[in-house]
Amino acid sequence: MSNPENLKYTSSHEWVKTEADGTISIGITQHAQELLGDMVFVEAPKVGRKLAAREECTVVESVKAASDVYAPVSGVVTAVNGDLEHTPEAINSDPYGAWIFRMKPDNAADITALPDAKAYQAVVDSEAH
Amino acid sequence: MTALKQTPLNAAHRAMGARMVDFGGWEMPVNYGSQIDEHHQVRNDCGMFDVSHMRVVDIKGASAREFLRYLLANNVDKLTQPGKALYSCMLLDNGGVIDDLIVYFMSEAWFRIVVNAGTADKDIAWMKQQAGEFNVHVPPAVAAAPLASSTAGKQSQEALDKAVPDLAIADHPELAMIAVQGPHAREKVWAALPGSQGLTEGLIPFSAVEMGTMFIARTGYTGEDGFEIMIPARAAPYLWASLAEKGVKPVGLGARDTLRLEAGMNLYGQDMDESINPLEAGLAWTVDLKSERDFIGKAALLARPPTRKLVGLVLEDRGVLRGHQQVHTAFGPGEITSGSFSPTLGKSIALARVPDAVKIGDNVQIEIRDKLLNAKTVRYPFARNGKAVCNL
């Protein structure tokens, strides 16, 4: 599965989607879910929490390991995906559909500066060596 | 960085889409697809594991039994029928666990031991050191002869047994091992390995039989029925392919870990190590303190009664128990030694070392990140033979 062109990414393997209302949805990439394996638990941040860029704010746990998810930019948490409480495996089956939380970014320009699909693929490729 | 060691099945794993990881210096498959599916596959049908990284060590010669009586915490005198196996710890003088192993009694002049991969070199060095007073001989021919000649069979084996003076420790890194586990494991092996049914149909659990250059044991590390098959490295890929052809799915080390945890089986290096004695690792049933027999570590175990014990935990809140998390009990602190998600129970489970006064059914709290989550102590195993067996 290739990384969708319409998304932005981080070097810590989150994807970022800008929604119509200006908020951003955050999930983990295909590469990240493949490394972690079967997801069994998601601990999402509380709505209203203020996050700094690159702050640890979510833990996703697979059978194998727990892994931190970071805020891609600074902002405030506006929503969490409650479905993942019962179906964390959606992150495995549909990583780019299974958003984990949404934020209102402090500065929309911060999103533009994030790596695009091609730049993110270069990060993944470099880790393989 | 030194290159990772590979088993003879490395290419087969890659061809089957395995994700390969560094497992204690070995490049091993952790999963092929979904680890949870692989787990259920073994509980409900059958699956095959490459466990070629584990090491086979033969103890041969007239003094073999006497040596093992002294070397191992469990009593090899329980082994009277050829082929029968025994689980045991091998201890330091201070009672700490050097390794846990299975010893198979094949004849008075031949006991076969299977040890963990990560500890194999240390184990063999320890065995040789302890064997000093048993007049050990390590003829180079012993390592190759019995397994290399398939046609010479029993006769050369007997000649060899006679040729070994008193005690020989023969390491067999050239043997690969494939575990086939699950309720349908035996019939799949019979279909994949012509001639094996007649030899192994009557094999009782925890015993083994030779088949040419192969060694077939009705043992495992999953809590399910099945076989562990030791086979010369060059032949292993053919057996693997033959099993795959009969529909046996490969299972990675990820599912192996959740299967053994559900089955309540200790993992060396996590649930016990050289700093832990077997009485504090849930292994009192494998330590023979009743007989007159002396063994390495016995005096230390008798001198210091255990103050801690291993219990099962089931997490009642949402989250996942992991090794090294702190356990808060009414009788003081404890620590999780192995924790994960149990696919059979659909909950997180763990083994934890806690103060001896903690009872089964007690409520305890687990420190996970900045929170205290509720868990209950249970008697393990959690699951065996396809079903949950612990009281929740």
Image (cartoon, rainbow, N blue to C red):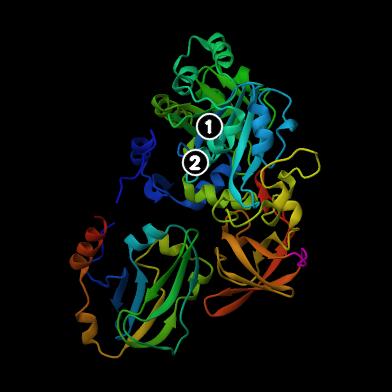
* Nearest to the observer: residue B380 or residue B317: B380
In the picture, the disc for residue B120 is 2
Residue hosting label 1: B57
- The amino acid pointed to by label 2 is Ala
In the structure shown, which secondary structural element does the residue marked by tag 1 occupy?
strand
Q: Are marks 1 and 2 in contact (CB under 8 Å)?
A: yes
x and y percentages locating residue A79 in the rendered image: 43, 83
In the figure, B187 relative to B194: above or below?
A: below
Please give the range of residues in magenta. B356-361
Q: Residue at x 57, y 37 (%)?
A: B181
The residue lying at 45 percent from left, 51 percent from top is B34
Badge 2 crowding class, 10 Å Cα cut-off, few under 14, some 14 to 19, many 20 or more, is many
Residue B94's disc is none
The magenta stretch spans residue B315: no
Q: Is residue B352 left or right of residue A116?
A: right
Vertical order, A119 against B8 (above or below): below
Name the side, left or right, on which B9 lies relative to A118: right
